[in-house]
Image: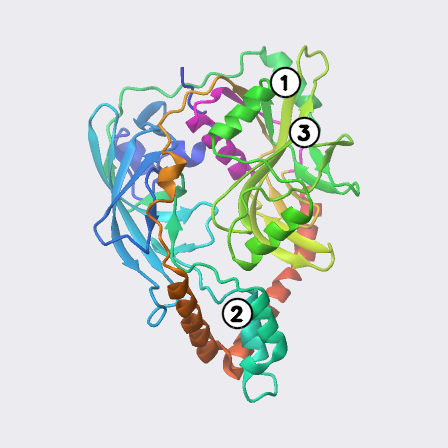
Amino acid sequence: MRIRLSARRLAFIYALSAASVALGCEQLPAGQTLWIRLSSPISTYSAKVGDPVHAVLTQDVVCGSDVLLPMGSSVEGVVKSKRKVGWGIRYERAALELEFQQVSLRSGRTVPMTARVEEVEDARENVKNGVIHGVMSTDTFEGRINSRLIHLPTWNPYSDLGLIVYKATIPIFPEPEIYYPSGTDMRLKTTTSTTAAATGEKLANEPYSAAAALLDTWVQQVPYRTTTLQSGDADLVNLIFVGSQQQVETAFGQAGWRTSDPVGKRSVMKNLYALLNNNGYAQQPMKTFLVEGKPQDMSWQKGLNSYGRRDHLRVWQWTPEGANEPVWISASTHDTGAVLSVKYKGFVHHISPDIDGEREKVIRDLNFSGCVKSISYMPRPGVQTMTQNAVGDLIRTDGSVAVVELQECHPVAPEVPASASTSSFRPGNHAFRYLRKQILTFRNDIWRANIIYGAYDLGRMAITAMRHQSEPAVNATIRKCSR
């Protein structure tokens, strides 16, 4: 039987506004969050205004204990507008606006609604006012080098030998069109109130089957933090998985998560290519962290098309005192960007401060895959609710650890075969892409390779550097809160 998540703990989707309560849960208010997963691919290269968009809900929408929109329900929308880069003569960036108009329940009932995209999870594209804005192909190392070297004292910047060698050696140019395969997760927000009477289903809140006292004893034994190889404080432990190793591996595999490649020449080259191409690396190597001196037993991650953004966690086998079988403890975080750090002698990923949100992301994915039997949230009073990780990024948490009991997986909705995910994306032949590259590069040099834009760029970098100088104030806040 499918067990849904705790209404008390998953407040960001379960708690409706005061207006909703006043109406007796008969309406979803404007601003309600919906998590969906595309069940068909979409691209600015081939999409037309009015084309249908198909997705499924990946999380129940409830009011109190009543389920209003159950996960697995079909969500239908259309392409409201789109802007294609094409040859690059008129536009440098692609744009895509989707409007979702109804939810089709498994009972056959249809719930009309109006919702727009607020976030494409782990995407390199940004969303503003419901419009997905594509990346600029010249916003790469090669594009920046073009803009910088054009100021060298030569009559023709393209005659510079170093630039010619670089462009010939690394002819990498990111695809500017927007493309999302089936399986892409999106966060929607309703723009108008929606009538959605309860379906008759009730939100189940079945805790882990172990005795409460025994579970509490286990949780209090769990190490609070992971450490780096240099014994520095790293991530906070915020998840416990109860089940066999096979169940853990199957659950994450069913949820679309990937393991990490070992560090080596091949992974280094893949990392470099992903960085230069401004794209994702599905199995990026992950640094070794320790729990009580032991390195992780598993590493799992999930991304889309961004090198810097991904969901990831490390898992350790751990045996509580008095337990007959081991459990699996985990520290999960969400990467939001990657930078080349001189201090740390390599690329450093920065994380979102909200690790509780990442904890819920993991649970949402496993629950949608039908691999979760029960969930319990256990408080740990000794955990700092505000701290920092090994590279100084802020961490905020409620201090609780989620105990997730696994079961044999029974997916809520059928997955679209991987072969269908890429069939509609045809970016053009080599000749077209080469000519588009030259046009976009020329546009970039005309608009940005000048002293005015150079001054703006320098000012932007200075402001970014000044923001990083605010870290001492963050440290002071942490010290004050930890007293």
Q: Quadrant of the C terminus?
A: top right
Pick whichever, 102 or 91, lies toward us.
91
| Picture residue at 40% right of the left edge, 34% below the top | 13
10 Å crowding of disc 2: few (<14), some (14-19), many (20+): some
10 Å crowding of disc 3: few (<14), some (14-19), many (20+): few
Q: Would you name the residue on which mark 1 appears?
A: 216
Q: Quadrant of the N terminus?
A: top left
User: In this rendering, is residue 3 above or below 127?
Assistant: above
| Picture residue at 61% right of the left edge, 39% below the top | 260
**Earlier-in-chain disc, 1 versus 3:** 1
**Earlier-in-chain disc, 2 versus 3:** 2
Judged from the image, the secondary structure of the residue bearing numbered disc 2 is helix
Q: Would you name the residue on which mark 3 appears?
A: 297
Judged from the image, the secondary structure of the residue bearing numbered disc 3 is loop
Residue type at the position of mark 3: Asp
Q: Would you name the residue on which mark 2 appears?
A: 143
Q: Position of residue 262 (x, y in %)?
A: 67, 40
Q: Which residues are magenta?
A: 355-384
The answer to whether residue 375 of the structure is visible from this angle is yes
| Picture residue at 61% right of the left edge, 21% below the top | 245
